[in-house]
Image (spheres, rainbow, N blue to C red):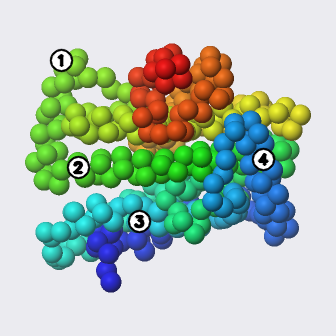
Amino acid sequence: MTFAAERLIDWRTARSIGARAAGAGESIAPIERAKLAEDIAQVVPEAEGMVQELTGLVPGGYRSRGWVMSRSDWVGANLRGFERVLEPFAQKVMANRTDGALANVRRAALGAQLGGLLGYMGRRVLGQYDLFLPPDDDGLLYFVGANVIGVERRFHLPEREFRLWISAHEVTHRLQFGTAPWLKDHLMGMVSSYLDSVELDPSWLVQSLRRAIEEVRRGRTQVDGLGWVFLLLTPDQRAVVQRIQASMSLLEGHASFVMNGLPKDRLPNAALFNRRLRERRQAAGLDKAMQRAIGFDAKVRQYTAGERFVTEVIGRVGMGAFNRIWEGPENMPNLDEIGRPERWVARVATS
């Protein structure tokens, strides 16, 4: 059986380009790799217990466990996730198209673009909770070995403590979704809604550009977050993207708040780790332009805005009232509330 996503994108090309773009990273001796795998196997459950104690969140389903992988492994795992997510969209795109003479060229070009994007990201990511894993793999957390060891070497960090600290971030994501089983379907529904709203007629792009230019000239729009891409969205699409952006700000900010709020006797160097990762994000030149192009700078801002929201809400009403967020989608903050936490407190926590 041939899936529509296979007719849309050459996934083999994506994997090949992605692996080359990612590179191998730091050279790791077998004994170092084994030590990293052993540490991750130990610190992930340890981090899970610490995060549970701080937040009151519960794992649900399987316990969290780590997989130390290569950069190319990470690219391949994320491509499989993309393929699952894009299948309904691909069915829509390919429904009325035949595979003409240029089909393979188009597939290869899309595969190369997607592979290049993930290859670049594979050089940066330390750990990941994969939202798109099938149920049998629930609780699996990714750690890119070359990147973790590369950061430790570059900044001379205490290895096991740093590994515990980054594990806390990914474990927090795992517990968010374990505590709120509705959350995955909620996010996937928003992504599907956005993809369903995308126009396939090329004239749509021309019309959108004209409308965007007019809005900018008249000062009727704000260029934030997603930059010029946001200007191409219809009002309905913008509403969906804003909901996605608010949700991601919350989830990333909450994970950052937790990893930096764990007991200092267990993580005495957390503040140092935080500073070093901020330094690492300060890319320059071509690297900085690439980060803007793929939205990496927007993701960093999500961490900051979301962490500020979580910090202020918990400071006002405490962890118990904050955890009402996980009761249902109606309690999730919108983008306005992320910037003005007192509005969420008034609407949800004290209502």
Instruction: Identify the residue at image location x=48%, y=47%.
Output: 183
Give residue 49's mark.
4
Q: Earlier in the sequence, mark 4 or mark 1?
A: 4
Quarter holding the N terminus is: bottom left
Per the model, the C-alpha gap separating discs 3 and 2 is: 18 Å
Which label's residue is closer to the chain start, 1 or 2? Answer: 2
- Residue 304 visible? The answer is no
Q: Position of residue 153 (x, y in %)?
A: 79, 48
The residue type indicated by label 2 comes to Val
Provide the residue designation for mark 2: 198
Question: Residue 78: x, y in percent?
Answer: 50, 61
Q: Which mark is residue 84?
A: 3
Disc sitting over residue 218 in the figure: 1
Mark 3 and mark 2 in contact? Answer it, CB < 8 Å.
Answer: no
294 or 60: nearer the viewer:
60
Residue type at mark 3 is Arg
Q: Say what secondary structure mark 2 lies in.
A: loop
Callout 4 secondary element: helix
Q: Are marks 3 and 4 in contact (CB under 8 Å)?
A: no
- SS under mark 3: helix
